[in-house]
């Protein structure tokens, strides 16, 4: 394996990585999405919500069995729903404000990536593990890390094969 | 006499292929040697943990059944676990065994002493030991029981890590076992062969950045007393029955430091070394431990950190009562850990053997040696799994400090602290590089193992190629779970 060839392969992996990142830049047209999230020990339905960056989300929260919370990472949103109540309670945790009663909550999915929504009100034994996922595409971290995994493997193998490089 | 754990004679640590630097910490920090040589060293390390641990057990028995409000769950399964897997194991190896409170009653039963040492003559050892001092069965002188014990506990982990009473009863059972085994068998049979925590510590301590070793192999060869393993009037016989002259891996050294005290030649020292310096697995029991641990990291990530409520309900059997679902979950985990994953590993190793045209090594040898590649990746996968535990659920530590039993106390004024995760949106950005680092270290050490086996760079690379693809695929599965 010559140094030139080694450099070419590293370059190819870097280009592939850049390509993946560049593809991620292509914006999808924002749309309105209305989502009803139902909470029941110890799961949310839907368990995974996929939206595009820029989508305007209208969210309603319902609890089916006991009081459940809904803490959405990355969006400064914490809500609480009680069974058989059409309204729910919401607050912005960063401000320290008290919960206010709402019928629905609206926000723009302006941060891309994978964000968990978690129960923030103790609801039973498995409460700390009750969670769902909001995936705001493009979630560039995922394809980028896959490419990096392939890159780490290729470069490692090539380095091993090369004389003088362990 | 029980089998010495580290036969046959290994190369001296300096000969390990990945060794690039090694620092004698006792030379660099003489105070450390003085501290370690003090007779009260280990008991002083154990005592605070002992007090805390029994507070935890009381909290488990008499405190609130709500896990996130009970100190046994919050401190053991969030704080302790995180510190253990992310800091203690990779940096300090089995240092938890130095301070573990589980075997302390058993030790006392054997030694009738907490600090002082008794010289004497018991079954070939130079100490006076009490109890039956029977020999541990040779057929069980391996870590298979630890493998099955850990897998069994892990299948019930949804109960163990959420129910204070279950945690308290399991810890109580482990203490009881440690006491009974210490009375019946010589030395620390419980730690060596049964403790489920010890099993994974033994595997992942191979990566740790410290090691306790002899300074001079020559001094050990000339030593006639073998006081490190047999004991002396200065120190107890090695509770793990390890002869320091042949010790070449961290796996079965519990860092109790008795050998530092008993060595008549002052030939034992603590060394700092590079990450993942021990690269030799030595038996199927260790290979299966590596497989079980990696599969369990995957299983925990799906069950506890995944969004799939029905799988949580399967695992949460005592509440859901869904025995059919539990059977699927338990049998799938067991099958994957004991059959499918080791089977896949064997296949890729055989493929690598075929590519390298390696006929001078048996498939068994290659399988055992190359399985080491699961160790760095497994450890880093566990660390990646543990990051959200502390960043998300670590907030419970603050409220539980003031109300450890969930009885409504407010000892430090923090009982009402509202649950607030710590930068949770950044968790995937930490997990991805951790996993990639695990892949890198697995490949790197895998190459050292292959080079050690084949002695030829090209052959080593060819033998490693299919395994590299396998390790990359495993990493991608974890990436899909954590960031995908």
Image (cartoon, rainbow, N blue to C red):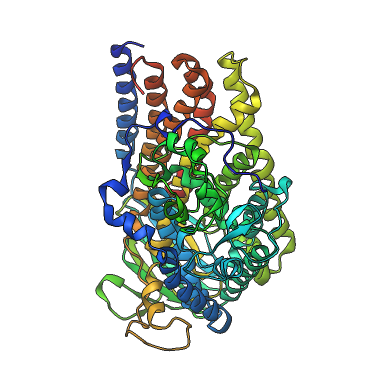
Question: Where residue B217 appears, x then y in whole percent?
Answer: 44, 35
Given residues B125 and B468, the one toward you in this image is B125
Whether B186 is drawn above or below B318: the answer is: above
Question: Where residue B270 appears, x then y in whole percent?
Answer: 37, 47
Whether B123 is drawn above or below A155: the answer is: below
Given residues A69 and B346, the one toward you in this image is B346
Give residue B257's quadrant in the image. Answer: bottom left
Give residue B47's quadrant in the image. Answer: bottom left
Q: Can residue B144 be seen in this view?
A: yes
Question: Where residue B239 appears, x then y in whole percent?
Answer: 56, 56
Residue drawn at 62 percent across, 60 percent down: B310
Residue drawn at 53 percent across, 28 percent down: B467
Task: Name the image quarter holding the C terminus of chain A.
Answer: top left
Q: Residue furthest top?
A: A2
Given residues B412 and A36, the one toward you in this image is B412
In the picture provided, is B379 more to the left or to the right than A165? right
* Count of numbered circles in the view: 0
In the picture provided, is A131 more to the left or to the right than A163? right
In the picture provided, is A38 more to the left or to the right than B42? right
Question: Where residue A90 appears, x then y in whole percent?
Answer: 36, 75
Q: Is residue A61 visible?
A: no
Given residues B147 and B245, the one toward you in this image is B245
Task: Name the image quarter holding the N terminus of chain A.
Answer: top left
In the picture provided, is B144 more to the left or to the right than B68? right
Whether B162 is drawn above or below B472: the answer is: below
Residue drawn at 54 percent across, 81 percent down: B58
């Amino acid at each position: 394996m010559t140094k030139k060839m080694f450099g070419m392969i590293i370059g190819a992996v870097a280009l592939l990585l850049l390509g993946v990142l560049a593809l991620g830049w292509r914006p999808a047209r924002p749309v309105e999405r209305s989502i009803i999230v139902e909470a029941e020990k110890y799961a949310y339905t839907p368990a995974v919500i996929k939206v595009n960056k820029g989508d305007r989300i209208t969210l309603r929260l319902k609890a089916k069995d006991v009081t459940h919370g809904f803490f959405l990472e990355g969006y400064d949103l914490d809500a609480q729903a009680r069974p058989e109540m059409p309204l729910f309670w919401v607050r912005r945790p960063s401000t320290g404000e008290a919960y206010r009663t709402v019928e629905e909550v609206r926000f723009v999915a302006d941060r891309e990536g994978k964000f968990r929504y978690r129960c923030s009100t103790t609801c039973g034994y498995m409460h700390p593990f009750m969670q769902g996922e909001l995936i705001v595409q493009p979630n560039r971290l995922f394809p980028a890390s896959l490419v990096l995994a392939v890159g780490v493997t290729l470069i490692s193998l090539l380095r091993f094969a090369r004389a003088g490089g362990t | 006499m029980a089998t010495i754990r580290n036969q046959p004679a290994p190369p001296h640590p300096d000969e390990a292929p990945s060794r690039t630097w090694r620092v004698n910490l006792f030379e660099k920090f003489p105070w450390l040697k003085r501290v370690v040589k003090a007779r009260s060293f280990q008991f002083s390390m154990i005592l605070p943990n002992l007090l805390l641990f029994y507070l935890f057990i009381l909290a488990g028995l008499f405190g609130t059944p709500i896990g996130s409000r009970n100190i046994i769950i919050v401190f053991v399964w969030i704080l302790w676990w995180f510190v253990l897997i992310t800091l203690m194991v990779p940096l300090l190896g089995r240092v938890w065994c130095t301070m573990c409170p589980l075997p302390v009653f058993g030790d006392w039963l054997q030694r009738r002493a907490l600090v002082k040492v008794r010289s004497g003559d018991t079954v070939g050892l130079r100490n006076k030991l009490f109890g039956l001092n029977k020999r541990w069965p040779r057929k069980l002188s391996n870590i298979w029981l630890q493998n099955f014990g850990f897998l069994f506990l892990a299948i019930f982990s949804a109960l163990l890590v959420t129910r204070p009473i279950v945690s308290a009863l399991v810890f109580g059972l482990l203490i009881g076992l440690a006491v009974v085994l210490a009375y019946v068998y010589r030395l620390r049979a419980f730690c060596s062969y049964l403790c489920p925590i010890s099993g994974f510590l033994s595997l992942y301590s191979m990566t740790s950045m410290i090691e306790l070793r002899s300074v001079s192999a020559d001094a050990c060869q000339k030593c006639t007393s073998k006081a490190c393993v047999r004991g002396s009037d200065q120190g107890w016989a090695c509770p793990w029955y390890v002869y320091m002259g042949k010790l070449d891996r961290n796996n079965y050294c519990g860092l109790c430091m008795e050998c530092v005290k008993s060595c008549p030649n002052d030939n034992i020292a603590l060394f700092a070394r590079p990450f993942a310096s021990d690269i030799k697995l030595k038996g199927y029991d260790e290979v299966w431990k590596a497989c079980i641990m990696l599969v369990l990291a995957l299983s925990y990530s799906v069950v506890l950190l995944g969004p799939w409520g029905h799988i949580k309900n399967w695992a949460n059997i005592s509440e859901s009562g869904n025995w059919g679902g539990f059977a699927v979950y338990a049998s799938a985990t067991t099958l994957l850990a004991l059959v499918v994953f080791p089977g896949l590993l064997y296949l890729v190793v055989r493929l690598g053997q075929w590519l390298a045209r390696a006929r001078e090594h048996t498939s068994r040898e290659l399988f055992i040696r190359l399985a080491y590649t699961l160790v760095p990746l497994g450890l880093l996968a566990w660390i990646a799994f543990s990051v959200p535990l502390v960043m998300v659920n670590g907030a419970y530590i603050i409220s539980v400090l003031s109300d450890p039993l969930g009885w409504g106390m407010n000892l430090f004024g923090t009982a009402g602290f509202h649950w607030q995760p710590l930068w949770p949106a950044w968790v995937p950005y930490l997990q991805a590089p951790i996993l990639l680092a695990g892949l890198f270290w697995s490949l790197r050490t895998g190459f050292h193992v292959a080079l050690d086996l084949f002695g030829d760079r090209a052959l080593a690379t060819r033998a490693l190629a299919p395994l590299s693809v396998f390790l990359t695929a495993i990493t991608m599965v974890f990436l899909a779970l954590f960031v995908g």
